[in-house]
Image (cartoon, rainbow, N blue to C red):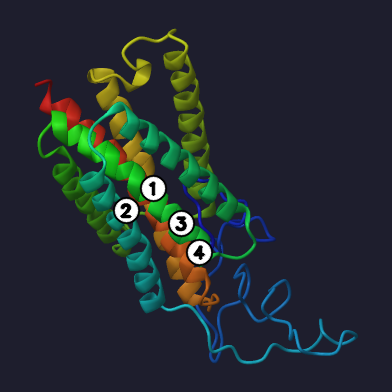
Amino acid sequence: MRSSNPVFSRRGFSRDNGYAGFNAQQQPQAGGPAVGTNPYAQGAGNPYATNPYAPADTQYDAPAPVRTDAMTMDDVVTRTGMTLGTVVLGAVLAWAVLPVSPSSYGIAIGSALVAFVLAIVQSFKRTPSPALILSYAAFEGIFLGVISEMYNSRWDGAPFQAVLGTMAVTGAMLFVYKQRWIRVTARYARVGMTIAIAFIAVMAVNLLLVVFGVADDGGLRSFGPLGVIVGILAILIGCFFLTLNFKEIEDGITYGAPRQESWLAAFGLTVTLVWIYLEMLRLVAIFSGDD
């Protein structure tokens, strides 16, 4: 179970080039999890299959003790609630304390940069850090609070509509995933990630062009028809990331991932939901028109 989001993680690939167990047959054996591409299976290549308390000369041959700390759906829901709750709390405080002003925009940009750095650090850590993830959520919340207040001051009710839109998209994708209308395979993940990386690269170039005055009115991120197309594409990419999140959570629970991995699940879902919310906010503003 590894996180794959706009914050790209190097931890999502198993030794056989499968993706988070996507090539595995999800049929746990009697008395234990499945084998094959399962990164948590009790067999060769499983980092959790060795006994860390065995003598040094026999450590790698000794069977692992029975683990009682496997990740559950309750763990994922609890950690996700804590992470999203921190985002919401940060956003509410920022909205209430910081007025719409240039200085607030500076605080928002600074918070976004800090959140981005924390997210990158967590993505490259070997183990999840709850403190790091919650700190990311707090700074992300401050950023969202200021930005949401800015949009609300010009397009009254836009943040509320964006929240409803994010919830609707998330619920729809969960339903589609549970119905198996989308099959998350290794090929699906590779193609989707290629498209997502290309999209982010184009958006980064567009941002540079806007900053240096080469592209006017936001370039590809304008508030015109082109901006609508780009926004819809961004939301579709967010939906793709949601399917990866759902698959990773499902695999983690099925294959007995350590309980601490639920923090990565919460982190991944939070990054994806923030991505979708921001795109929803822009689309609501575009469709609302100018005051």
CA gap, disc 4 and disc 2: 15 Å
Q: Is residue 68 above or below residue 173?
A: below
CA gap, disc 2 and disc 3: 10 Å
**Which mark is first along the chain, 2 or 4?**
2
Residue at x-position 34% and y-position 71%: 77
Measured as percent of width and height from the top left, residue 161 is found at 14, 43
- Residue type at the position of mark 3: Ser
- Residue type at the position of mark 1: Glu
Residue 168 relative to residue 23: left or right: left
* Residue annotated with mark 3: 135
Q: Is residue 184 visible?
A: no
Neighbourhood count class around disc 4 (C-alpha, 10 Å): few under 14, some 14–19, many 20 upward: few
- Residue type at the position of mark 4: Ala
Which one is in front, 203 or 20?
A: 203
* Residue annotated with mark 1: 140
Secondary structure beneath label 1: helix
Q: Are dots 4 and 1 in contact, CB under 8 Å?
A: no
Secondary structure beneath label 4: helix
Residue 253 relative to residue 270: left or right: right
Secondary structure beneath label 2: helix
**Which mark is first along the chain, 3 or 1?**
3
Q: Are dots 2 and 1 in contact, CB under 8 Å?
A: yes
Q: Is residue 17 above or below residue 277?
A: below
Q: Are dots 3 and 4 in contact, CB under 8 Å?
A: yes
- Residue type at the position of mark 2: Gly
Quarter of the figure with residue 17:
bottom right
Which quadrant is home to the C terminus?
top left
CA gap, disc 1 and disc 3: 8 Å
Q: Nearer the viewer, mark 2 or mark 1?
A: 2
* Residue annotated with mark 4: 131
* Residue annotated with mark 2: 90
Measured as percent of width and height from the top left, residue 115 is found at 46, 46
